[in-house]
């Protein structure tokens, strides 16, 4: 078991303003298969390498003081992949949480999952629910694992739940606000992500946090996810801190 040590003197932290770290970082971990194919390796090797990248990014996020890290582990569209690859992905997801749970818990990480649970294999769901229960009282980094997640389905779910409240008389149509709506999203306990990172150079959201990312700063990284490491993470923070966040306004003067 390893207790992570934060080293503020690390050269990689140079030029990072520790007072302007995003509270919530969301990542689309893309490019595992392409990384492997570029090296003439099976796609499964890329997925396993992606797990190693996640381990380093979780540690780096904690070192930076990021409060919420939300990772796109498996989308509702990923079921279109070959069954053999889906099986490997599910196996790796279960392996990751079982191997890392003790270390994550020791470092005060709180694990949460969200998505359509009914479609997730029972053994995988059991492993993650157990991790969520074990770490529910931790107060450090919140690691949100978006598992069998699709933002359009999430939004439709919220719409239906709000409609049911109106139908039952518990809520008046005129009372519906963004804040009311957001209480029905999976991320109801998290602030919106200030920074959204996507690896592998692809420039799309892929049905990820469509509501929540309305004002996120988006950083596209050309390297595939297995090559994304602690140094890469720190560089995205530097890019974020060089952006001017106006939220539709205009800087005076």
Image (cartoon, helix red, strand yellow):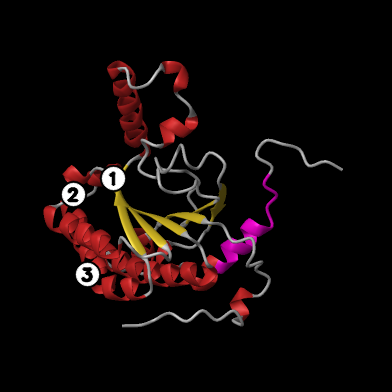
Q: Earlier in the sequence, mark 2 or mark 3?
A: 3
**Residue 245 drawn above or below residue 240:** above
**Residue 229 visible in the picture:** no
Tag count in the figure? 3
Q: Position of residue 129 (x, y in %)?
A: 21, 57
**Badge 3: how crowded within 10 Å, few (<14), some, or many (20+)?**
some
Residue at 55 percent across and 46 percent down: it is: 216
Residue at 20 percent across and 54 percent down: it is: 86
The front one of 142 and 49 is: 142
The front one of 37 and 64 is: 64
Q: How far, Cα to Cα, is label 2 from label 3?
A: 16 Å
The numbered disc on residue 98 is: 3
Q: Position of residue 154 (x, y in %)?
A: 34, 36
**Residue 244 lies in magenta, yes or no?**
yes
Q: Earlier in the sequence, mark 1 or mark 2?
A: 1
Say which element carries label 1. Answer: loop
Q: Position of residue 153 (x, y in %)?
A: 32, 34
**Residue 150 drawn above or below residue 102:** above
Q: Which residues are magenta?
A: 234-245
**Residue 165 drawn above or below residue 76:** above
The front one of 242 and 107 is: 107
Say which element carries label 2. Answer: loop
Q: Position of residue 207 (x, y in %)?
A: 39, 40
**Badge 2: how crowded within 10 Å, few (<14), some, or many (20+)?**
some
Residues at marks 1 and 2 touching, judged by CB atoms closer than 8 Å: yes
Q: Which residue is mark 2?
A: 120
**Residue 246 lies in magenta, yes or no?**
no
């Amino acid at each position: 078991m390893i207790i992570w040590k934060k080293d503020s003197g690390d050269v990689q932290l140079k030029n990072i303003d520790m007072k302007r770290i995003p509270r919530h970082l969301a990542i689309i971990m893309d490019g595992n298969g392409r990384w492997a194919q570029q090296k003439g390796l099976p796609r499964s090797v890329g997925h396993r390498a992606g797990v190693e990248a996640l381990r380093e990014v979780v540690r780096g996020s904690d070192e930076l003081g990021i409060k919420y890290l939300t990772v796109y582990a498996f989308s509702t569209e990923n079921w279109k992949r070959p069954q053999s690859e889906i099986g490997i992905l599910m196996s790796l997801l279960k392996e990751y949480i079982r191997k890392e749970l003790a270390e994550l818990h020791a470092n005060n990480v709180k694990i949460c999952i969200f998505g359509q649970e009914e479609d997730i294999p029972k053994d995988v769901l059991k492993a993650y629910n157990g991790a969520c229960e074990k770490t529910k009282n931790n107060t450090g980094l919140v690691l949100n694992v978006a598992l069998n997640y699709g933002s359009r389905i999430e939004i439709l779910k919220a719409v239906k739940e709000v409609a049911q409240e109106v139908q039952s008389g518990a809520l008046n149509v005129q009372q519906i606000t963004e804040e009311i709506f957001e209480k029905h999203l999976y991320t109801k306990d998290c602030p919106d992500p200030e920074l959204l990172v996507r690896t592998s150079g692809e420039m799309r959201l892929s049905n990820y946090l469509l509501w929540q990312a309305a004002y996120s700063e988006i950083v596209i990284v050309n390297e595939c996810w297995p090559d994304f490491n602690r140094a890469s993470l720190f560089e995205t923070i530097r890019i974020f801190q060089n952006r001017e966040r106006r939220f539709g306004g205009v800087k005076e003067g």
